[in-house]
Amino acid sequence: MNEHILIVDDEEMIRDLLSSALLQEGYNCFQAANVDAAFGILGEHPVDLVISDIMMPGRSGVDLLRDLKTVDPDIAVLMITGLSDMNTALECIHLGADDYITKPFGISRVILTVKNLIEKRCLAIEKKNYQTSLEFKVMEQTEQIRRTMNELHSAYDSTLTALVKALDAREKEVGSHSERVMNFSTFMASKLGIKGNELEQLAKGALLHDIGKIGISDNILLKPGKLDEAEWIEMRRHPQIGYAIMSEIKFLKGPAEIILTHHERFDGTGYPKQLKGTQIPIGSRIFGLVDTLDAMTSDRPYRRALPFDAVISEVRKFRGTQFDPDISDLFLSIPRGQWEECAGKHFI
């Protein structure tokens, strides 16, 4: 055990008492009689935990606490206070202290508290390092995708299709969800008179709509049960993650806009920007409807595919709220057989 503890107290007897007890437990101890001396030690030695009296001549323990976290935000802090000064002790907790003990204190209580705080600090640092490592890996993977896609510009169609198939497989999609919604989107866009480069950009936006899920952990993406609120917040980041990846690739700036807005709703209740009506790109308004078509008519881990008539009811029900009313009307006017031809399968 090599943890270093700094004891700050103007009473030498208390400093010696705590040092002696903690040394017997295997800790390395430094002593400081005031706040200025404490910062002198902190500037020269690594410290894992600070035990500080609150009331001291000159700068108080509260002053020490205020500046301590700027030296090292990971330092654990245990404050010592008198029974008559509990309000100040609680203020210290709000300022970042990890715990406090009151005078007179028992040495066994101090040792137990120190052990708990050291363990808590170690776990917090491990978690922080893991998170940093995870973020670095995501950034590294994202950068690798950017490099690969730029290097393979001449063959990016096949490369992107293969990548999307891998993402669909990761989510246990039946067939290729992304390719089907791309076909649905371009079919409907053609009916609306969209053609040429605009149609090509829409197609790629539909194909790559969920590319941002590459930055969502499997624990959330593949969770069999319902997501909690924190997990939903993380999941709803995928349009922005996808946009961040694709918007830096010159030939994918157009599709990136669809990737960013494919979960917006016509009534403004979607995410991430709560766009409303025609603020939502036409490609995303088309996609929002045909994505529902594919989701409902495909098998899911939690249910079998639903009948095509259920899709019709859904579109009618949410016309003007979730879906653009004009696009809804166009969808409803297209015979079922044409949608089945696009899907490459028969609906129930």
Image (tube, rainbow, N blue to C red):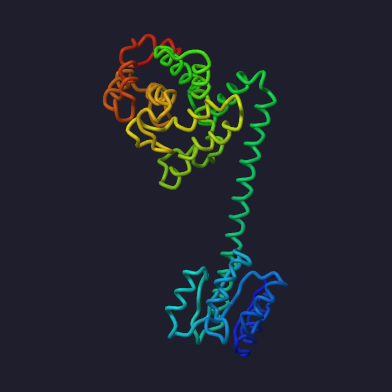
- Residue 159 location, x and y as percent? 63, 22
Residue at the image position 45 percent from the left and 12 percent from the top: 344
* Screen quadrant of the N terminus: bottom right
> How many numbered discs, if any?
0
Q: Is residue 284 above or below residue 91?
A: above
Q: Is residue 216 above or below residue 28?
A: above
Residue at the image position 30 percent from the left and 20 percent from the top: 312
Q: Nearer the viewer, residue 224 or 132?
A: 132
Tell me if residue 139 can be seen: yes
* Screen quadrant of the C terminus: top left
Residue most toward the front? 279
- Residue 120 location, x and y as percent? 56, 64
Left/right placement of residue 164 relative to residue 332 reads right
Residue at the image position 45 percent from the left and 32 percent from the top: 261
Residue at the image position 53 percent from the left and 39 percent from the top: 216
Left/right placement of residue 284 relative to residue 166 reads left
- Residue 264 location, x and y as percent? 40, 33
Left/right placement of residue 175 relative to residue 279 reads right
* Snapshot quadrant of residue 325: top left
- Residue 176 location, x and y as percent? 50, 21
Q: Nearer the viewer, residue 5 or 107?
A: 5
Residue most toward the right? 44
Q: Is residue 184 above or below residue 147?
A: above
Tell me if residue 1 can be seen: no
